[in-house]
């Protein structure tokens, strides 16, 4: 790694949590991620969801067709766990290299999660099988009960679901996805090496004021929802700490402008076009540029047991203006940082 003040060259990074959708939207957004990352963990919450190895294989083909000519981007596929998931199918998909992980969506927790798991007890034997074969579990960590405040849903999930699961299955590899709270950082720090976490750029940049102060800002709304400032600061410390447990996962979640700017606006922030630029600015702000390569390029592959990428990318400290909107296939999408100027630019 070279690190003069105004330039940073790191091993090619990966995105360990991403939504690509399908069809015209997918074809519009894939090039953004392929420009920035060598690989990405592709989330399976399509409608209908990617629940089997066969569906994941077919989706991977469609994604590869959308990768621009000359780019060697590799999608890493996940299966969406349901109450009916077939452990044999998961194991076969993992053994064949079609599936890299499986994703637990508590039913009703977020976008397209209505087919998700209604009670973790229903997938106990599937999780035991995953632990036995070393297949990682990606977790959307929020409870969904109406009596639990939306700002408390992650912390309550840790106490009620995640902590008991990790105790029951100490060998299961668990990625606590898109963490948003101090409690999540404390849990991950205190857990064994089989528990890691992804952190998004938005949760490093914004707290909940960004959604509500001065008017409702639908493009700042995602799930888990951004929390108080103390939580943002805990996430910034975790991401930049040098701990191997934390790695880059954008949770880039494209929704068309009209679906966000609506009576019932969708959850999800589309950060793919300037993801590295967004993250590196945070590392620069806290004086931790030297930790960026571990977070972006080394910790994820190590956790997943995959090789690090060949090659490198370079970021320069040069202003870049983020457009107000980008092409989203059938309609436009407003990207994270729309209309702002970021201080770093990806050059190669
Ligand atoms: C994601 C989406 O739109 O698919 N939305 C979000 O707010 N993050 C789903 C998810 O990861 O929760
Ligand atoms: Zn997501």
Image (cartoon, rainbow, N blue to C red):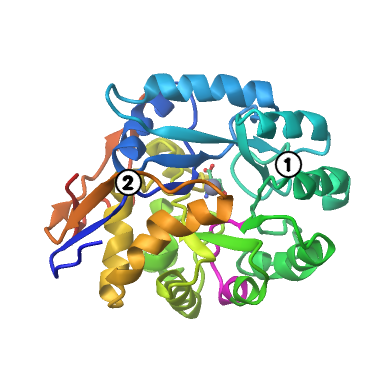
Q: Is residue 223 left or right of residue 101?
A: left
Task: Give the residue at mark 2.
Answer: 335
Residue 116 numbered mark, or none: 1
Judge whether residue 184 is colored magenta. yes
Q: Residues within 10 Å of mark 1 (few under 14, many from 20)?
A: many
Does residue 339 appear anywhere in the picture?
no
Q: Residue at x 34, y 61 (%)?
A: 293
Q: Residues within 10 Å of mark 2 (few under 14, many from 20)?
A: many
Q: Is residue 197 left or right of residue 12?
A: right
Using the image, determine if residue 136 lies above or below residue 161.
above
Which quadrant of the figure has residue 156? Answer: bottom right
Range of magenta residues: 176-185
Q: Is residue 278 left or right of residue 316?
A: right
Residue 210 image offset from top left, x and y in percent = 39, 65
Does residue 317 appear anywhere in the picture?
yes
Residue 340 image offset from top left, x and y in percent = 21, 57
Q: Residue at x 52, y 55 (%)?
A: 302
Q: Residue at x 43, y 57 (%)?
A: 298
């Amino acid at each position: 790694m070279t690190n003069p003040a105004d330039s940073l060259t790191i091993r090619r990074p990966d995105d360990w949590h991403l939504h690509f959708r399908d069809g015209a939207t997918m074809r519009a957004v894939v090039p953004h991620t392929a420009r920035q990352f060598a690989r990405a963990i592709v989330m399976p919450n399509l409608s209908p969801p990617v629940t089997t190895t066969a569906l994941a294989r077919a989706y991977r083909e469609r994604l590869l067709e959308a990768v621009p000519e000359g780019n060697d981007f590799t999608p890493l596929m996940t299966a969406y766990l349901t109450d009916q998931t077939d452990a044999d199918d998961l194991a076969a998909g993992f053994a064949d290299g079609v599936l890299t992980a499986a994703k637990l969506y508590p039913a009703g927790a977020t976008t397209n999660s209505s087919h998700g798991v209604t009670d973790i007890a229903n997938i106990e034997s599937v999780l035991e099988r995953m632990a036995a074969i070393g297949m990682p579990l990606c977790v959307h960590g929020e409870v969904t009960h109406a009596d639990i405040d939306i700002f408390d849903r992650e912390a309550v999930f840790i106490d009620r679901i995640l902590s008991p699961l990790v105790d029951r299955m100490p060998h299961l590899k668990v990625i606590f996805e898109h963490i948003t709270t101090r409690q999540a950082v404390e849990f991950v720090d205190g857990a064994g090496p089989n528990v890691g976490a992804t952190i998004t750029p938005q949760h490093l940049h914004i707290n909940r004021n960004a959604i509500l102060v001065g008017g409702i800002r639908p493009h700042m709304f995602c799930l888990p929802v951004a929390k108080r400032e103390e939580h943002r600061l805990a996430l910034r410390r975790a991401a930049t700490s040098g701990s191997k447990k934390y790695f880059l996962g954008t949770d880039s979640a494209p929704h068309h402008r009209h679906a966000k700017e609506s009576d019932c606006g969708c959850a999800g922030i589309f950060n793919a076009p300037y993801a590295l630029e967004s993250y590196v600015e945070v590392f620069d702000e806290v004086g931790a540029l030297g930790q960026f390569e571990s977070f972006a390029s080394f910790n994820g592959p190590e956790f997943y047991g995959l090789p690090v990428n060949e090659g490198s990318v370079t970021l320069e400290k040069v202003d870049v203006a983020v457009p107000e909107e980008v092409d989203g296939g059938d309609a436009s999408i407003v990207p994270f940082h729309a209309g702002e100027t970021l201080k770093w630019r990806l050059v190669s």
